[in-house]
Amino acid sequence: MYVTDTATDRVQKFDANGKFILQWGSFGSELGQFYKPKGISVLEDKVTVIDFGNHRGQVFSLDGEPLGIFGEGILSPTKNTSDLFTPLTQLSEGR
């Protein structure tokens, strides 16, 4: 289970029993940083976080490795983005 913690600008990951596994993020506007994260989605092997205060979204691996930033028509990838948004596109198309 993944949880956005708006008070501390981070994401936390827990196992099925609620045991803490890891966390990532801090206050800021750089890749991997947040300002009031308010939404989160896990689909296949990607975690998408809505970074409300920075007016963007960020995509991470299941272990918190930053994969890219999106929003306001701008994509700032750290890696090859050929499949970065495939699951999100499939979801929006009802697949």
Image (cartoon, rainbow, N blue to C red):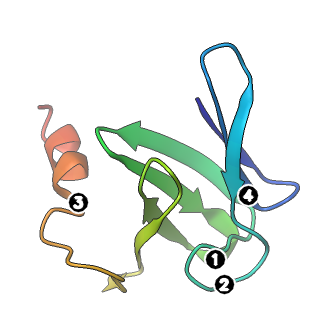
Q: Earlier in the sequence, mark 1 or mark 3?
A: 1
Q: Amino acid at mark 4?
A: Arg
The picture quadrant where one finds residue 31 is bottom right
Mark 2 Cα shell of 10 Å, populated few (<14), some (14-19), many (≥20) = some
Q: Earlier in the sequence, mark 2 or mark 1?
A: 2
**Residue placed under numbered mark 2 in the picture:** 29
Left or right position of 85 against 62:
left
Q: Earlier in the sequence, mark 2 or mark 4?
A: 4
Q: Hey, which residue is sitting farthest top in the picture?
A: 17
Q: Position of residue 46 (x, y in %)?
A: 36, 49
Which residue is pictured at 14% across the width and 43% down the height?
Answer: 90
Number of the front mark, 1 or 4: 4
Q: Amino acid at mark 3?
A: Phe
Q: Earlier in the sequence, mark 1 or mark 4?
A: 4
Q: Amino acid at mark 1?
A: Asn
Label of residue 11 in the image: none
Q: Secondary structure at mark 1?
A: helix
**Residue placed under numbered mark 4 in the picture:** 10
Which residue is pictured at 21% across the width and 43% down the height?
Answer: 92
Number of the front mark, 1 or 3: 3
Number of the front mark, 2 or 1: 2
**Residue placed under numbered mark 3 in the picture:** 85
Q: Position of residue 52 (x, y in %)?
A: 64, 64
Q: Secondary structure at mark 3?
A: loop
Left or right position of 59 against 8:
left
Q: CA distance from mark 3 to mark 2?
A: 21 Å
Q: Amino acid at mark 2?
A: Ser
Label of residue 54 in the image: 1
34 lies above or below 8: below
